[in-house]
């Protein structure tokens, strides 16, 4: 048994996944999303261990020959339900949702049965012969194909859930400290690439010509180590979500119908509330709260903002907050205030989100904005 650079990278990925799983388990309380992420990380670690059976020579020993690792189909539903737990507050695994785990359960049971049936066999050659008679390779090939197909199906469902959540968030919540889950979209892209590499490798393995076969699988498992690292670190820093249901709001907006006069009246009321009453200064302002203040329905307010102002609720409110910050940054009488103090007074409630939104809106950092637009030598705000 000899280690090389490839084994070290894969083992580092496994170790990283295990460490993140332990850290998540130590967080109190451990909610459903953390439990699902722990399961995702552990399954990724087991998937990585499969290649180590071969590179470390364990596959050529009687004990580890046909070691039961039939979990290829488990990662897809786990990842899907993890995304659901992040995008659907109050999510719980219940009822027929457990049916998603029947296929991986079947293949896991098959791999366990094969392992214990072959465990007493005294030679590698005889083990292989019996496994072939029991259609081991044919079933594993079928499992590989299902893994690729389910990866793309569940990947699509995951991406759709994130898109729905983001649409709802931008239309109903102005609080910029809530997670937008952009990192989750990037992770889904990473896993989509992982599924594509798996598809290519399986297709080439089943073709008549398969040069550099081991190199292709090395690349797959190195990439898998990167994916484990990414989701582990991002999962540890995941932020809490709002308490409403994204899907309910979306259905309301999609079915809402209003006349041009209704939308125009609502738009004028919205602008007045923002420009004269400065309602955007409320850091916890939501569409529901805004609509209640206006004595209008949330669907009407959202439709008016989208159609007549060409913005989402979140974008509109934060635009007014940014304008308020810009004015205060250039006011010499407020030079003694900190950037965070100004941001909080303008309705922001997170320093990190304030910097991000201010830069994306103006193209400048707050200090850079002062330098670019101050007409006098305004002291730098700390």
Image: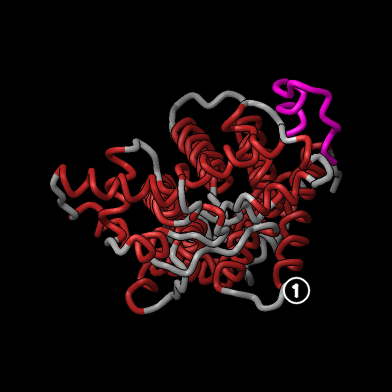
Q: Please determine whether, in this image, residue 57 is positioned above or below residue 283.
A: above
Residue at left offset 57%, top offset 51%: 176
Q: Please determine whether, in this image, residue 276 is positioned above or below residue 100.
A: above
Residue at left offset 30%, top offset 45%: 267
Residue at left offset 64%, top offset 75%: 30
Tag 1 residue? 26
- Please state if 312 lies on the left or on the right of 223 as rendered: left
Asked whether 208 or 278 is in front, the reply is: 278
- Please state if 214 lies on the left or on the right of 161 as rendered: right
Snapshot colouring: secondary structure
Asked whether 4 or 36 is in front, the reply is: 36
Q: Where is residue 285 in the image (x, y as percent from the top left)?
A: 49, 60
Asked whether 75 or 233 is in front, the reply is: 233
Q: In which quarter of the image is the C terminus?
A: top right
Q: Residues within 10 Å of mark 1 (few under 14, many from 20)?
A: few
Q: Where is residue 48 in the image (x, y as percent from the top left)?
A: 66, 51
Observer able to see residue 271: yes
Residue extent of the magenta highlight: 366-382
Residue at left offset 24%, top offset 48%: 265
Q: Where is residue 314 in the image (x, y as percent from the top left)?
A: 46, 48
Asked whether 154 or 268 is in front, the reply is: 268
Observer able to see residue 143: no
Q: Please determine whether, in this image, residue 336 is positioned above or below residue 62.
A: above
Q: Tag 1, which secondary structure?
A: helix
**Number of callouts in the render?**
1
Q: Is residue 56 highlighted in magenta?
A: no
- Please state if 113 lies on the left or on the right of 261 as rendered: right
Q: Position of residue 198 (x, y in %)?
A: 51, 39
């Amino acid at each position: 048994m000899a280690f090389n650079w490839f084994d070290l990278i894969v083992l580092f990925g496994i170790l990283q996944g295990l460490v993140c799983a332990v850290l998540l388990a130590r967080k109190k309380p451990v909610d459903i999303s953390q439990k699902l992420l722990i399961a995702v990380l552990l399954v990724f670690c087991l998937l990585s261990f499969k290649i180590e059976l071969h590179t470390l020579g364990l596959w050529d020993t009687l004990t580890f020959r046909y070691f039961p690792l039939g979990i290829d189909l488990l990662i897809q539903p786990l990842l899907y339900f993890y995304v659901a737990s992040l995008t659907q507050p109050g999510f719980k695994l219940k009822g027929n949702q457990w049916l998603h785990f029947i296929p991986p359960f079947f293949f896991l049971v098959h791999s366990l049965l094969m392992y214990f049936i072959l465990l007493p066999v005294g030679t590698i050659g005889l083990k292989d012969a019996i496994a072939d008679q029991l259609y081991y390779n044919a079933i594993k090939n079928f499992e590989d194909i299902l893994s690729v197909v389910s990866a793309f199906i569940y990947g699509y469902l995951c991406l759709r859930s994130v898109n729905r959540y983001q649409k709802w968030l931008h239309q109903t919540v102005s609080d910029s400290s809530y997670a937008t889950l952009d990192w989750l979209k990037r992770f889904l892209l990473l896993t989509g690439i992982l599924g594509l590499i798996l598809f290519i490798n399986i297709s080439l393995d089943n073709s008549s010509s398969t040069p550099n076969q081991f190199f292709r699988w090395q690349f797959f498992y190195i990439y898998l180590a990167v994916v484990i690292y990414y989701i582990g670190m991002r999962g540890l820093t995941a932020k809490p979500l709002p308490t409403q249901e994204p899907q309910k709001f979306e259905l309301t907006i999609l079915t809402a119908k209003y006349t041009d006069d209704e939308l125009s009246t609502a738009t004028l009321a919205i602008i007045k509330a923002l420009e004269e009453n400065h309602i955007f200064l409320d850091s916890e302002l939501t569409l529901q709260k805004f609509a209640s203040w206006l004595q209008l329905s949330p669907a009407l307010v959202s439709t008016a903002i989208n159609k007549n102002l060409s913005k989402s609720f979140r974008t509109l409110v934060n635009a007014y907050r940014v304008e308020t910050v810009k004015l205060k940054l250039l006011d010499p009488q407020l030079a003694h205030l900190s950037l965070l103090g100004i941001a909080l007074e303008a309705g922001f409630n997170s320093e990190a989100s304030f910097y991000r939104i201010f830069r994306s809106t103006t193209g400048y950092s707050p200090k850079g904005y002062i330098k670019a637009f101050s007409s006098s030598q305004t002291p730098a705000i700390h």
